Image: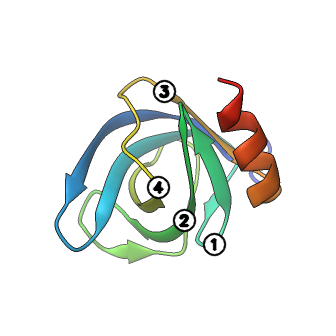
């Protein structure tokens, strides 16, 4: 496994939270997820504004096998949706428009 590659994973659950917007719990399967990266999941996309680990502690990056809470989605994805980091917002919009 290459920890420096873009993160790929799966959504375990997601919900709308007052004041935080859409919050998704994702399991990183490959690569490392960093705060500030742009990602696509199902029909939604977003920028990682914050990551929290299973103890609700803020972290800067998530490695494979780690379930983390991600804040920054533009909508609420479905459990089981794939989660993949993309290069930029234009790419994220392209990918989500054709799903």
Mark 2 burial class by Cα count in 10 Å: few <14, some 14-19, many 20+? many
Q: Label 2, label 4: how many angstroms apart (C-alpha)? A: 11 Å
Which secondary structure, mark 4? loop
Report the residue marked by disc 1. Answer: 36
Q: Which residue occupies the foreground of this view, 90 or 39? A: 90
Q: Which mark is residue 26?
A: none
Is label 1 or label 4 in front?
4
Q: Label 1, label 4: how many angstroms apart (C-alpha)? A: 14 Å
Report the residue marked by disc 2. Answer: 48
Report the residue marked by disc 3. Answer: 81
Q: Label 1, label 2: how many angstroms apart (C-alpha)? A: 5 Å
Ranked by sequence position, the earlier of labels 2 and 3 is 2
Residue located at (35% from left, 28% from top): 79
**Residue 63 in view, yes or no:** yes
Report the residue marked by disc 4. Answer: 74
The x, y position of residue 86, in whole percent, is: 76, 49
Which secondary structure, mark 2? strand
Ranked by sequence position, the earlier of labels 1 and 3 is 1
């Amino acid at each position: 496994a290459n920890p420096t590659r873009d993160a790929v994973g799966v959504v375990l659950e997601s919900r709308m939270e007052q004041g935080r917007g859409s919050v998704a719990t994702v399991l990183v399967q490959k690569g490392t997820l960093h705060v500030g990266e742009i990602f696509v999941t199902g029909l939604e996309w977003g920028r990682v504004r914050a990551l929290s680990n299973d103890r609700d502690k803020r972290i800067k990056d998530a490695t494979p096998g780690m379930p983390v809470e991600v804040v920054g989605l533009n909508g609420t994805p479905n459990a089981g949706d794939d989660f993949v980091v993309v290069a930029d917002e234009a790419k994220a919009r392209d990918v989500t428009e054709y799903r």
